[in-house]
Amino acid sequence: MKLQDLCVPVAKQMAWFVSICVMFVVFSCTTVAQTVDELSAELLPLIRSHQGEVSVSVLDLSSGLRFNYREKDVMPTASLIKLPVMIETYRQIAAGDLDQSMTLTLKATDKVPGSGILTRHFNDGFQLTLQDAIRLMIAFSDNTATNLVVDQIGLPTTSNTMATLGYPQTKLHSKVYRGDSSIFPDRSKAYGLGSTTAADIVGLLEDLHSKRLVTPESCDIMLEHLKSVEDKSQLPRLLPAEIEVAHKSGSVSKARCDAGIIYAPSGPIALCLLTNNNEDRRWTDDNAAELLNARIAKTVYEYFNPPHAGNAKRGHSTFSAFWGVRVVGARTPVRVGWPLTAAMSNRRRVSPAKDCDAML
């Protein structure tokens, strides 16, 4: 038998295999687009019925599926800006510029109103470590503790580091309740304490989850801080009590926001929910913006974890799992593989291409 006689059937088999792989890649991308459409159909009525501005970004960290709504709009952060402040503080600690065990002394001039416990419950001269101040800044959203931290890291450094990381719209404008310290006076006038986009914050959360910020050890510590947040009025509010959430909220009268990672049975989900110019500015349990954010989080959670659905997880392609086909975004290449049992046991999931996002 001649060599060319052997090559022809092999070539036909390879052509058949490539055709099948291409077919499943196309099918998978179509499935992802349909999945995003399904999630959009559940979220958009909630968003569009709200009387105020809304910006949302959702990322399933396991599959890569995204939902975005006005995710690049610059919005006020309120106390959500304390998340980037924490990241910058641990960057300086890792670089050796700060010592987390250094002692800070509380003075009367440091005390500012609003959320937290230092101003109301501790006397002048009280001493605490830098790490304690970080804990108070995140867990209790302590405004006085935040200013103690910002005094150590420097006011411009948070914005500078966010820009270096690729999040240029995330800026700390001033110290808390110290408007005269603003380094971005125009943005302070428009947005208050800080500004960001939903896309920026979800990018930071993805980096934090992937341990790409500072050091892996620092990421673990920061996530533990976020898991200790006392405020449950928004993102965690309607989720099952046993579900762990690492998040940071923020509230001023006209803007309510929350962002974090939901550790769902289907896998971790990052989301950022920002509102502004809300008609309802009441400080009540049924504030419309806080309920909106809670309902969005619940809808996202239940979308990926349908009630009474057993092990079924929406947003995942059976064909892509079998064939090892994975449709991905910009950071990961497309890859295909043979239909092995291992591919089934690993339950590979489809990640959407960039053009499958719901950018509305």
Image (cartoon, rainbow, N blue to C red):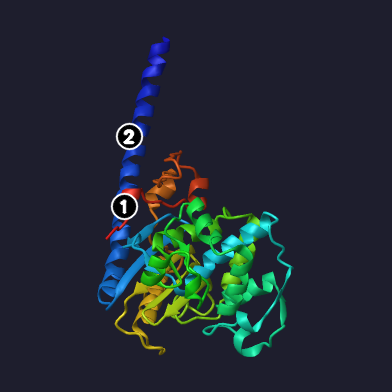
Tell me, yes or no, whether the two marked residues, 2 and 1, touch with CB atoms within 8 Å: no
Instruction: Tally the marks.
Output: 2
Q: Is residue 124 above or below residue 7?
A: below
Which mark identifies residue 356? 1
Local crowd size for mark 1, using a 10 Å CA cut-off: few (<14), some (14–19), many (≥20): many
Q: Kindly identify the residue that appears in the image at 43 percent across and 47 percent down.
A: 322
Q: Kindly identify the residue that appears in the image at 38 percent across and 28 percent down.
A: 14
* Occupied quadrant, residue 21: top left
Image quadrant where one finds the C terminus: bottom left
Q: Earlier in the sequence, mark 2 or mark 1?
A: 2
Label 2 SS: helix
- Is 230 left, or right, of 103 in this rendering? left
Image quadrant where one finds the N terminus: top left
- In this figure, which residue is indicated by the disc labeled 2? 19
* Occupied quadrant, residue 119: bottom right
- Is 126 left, or right, of 78 in this rendering? right
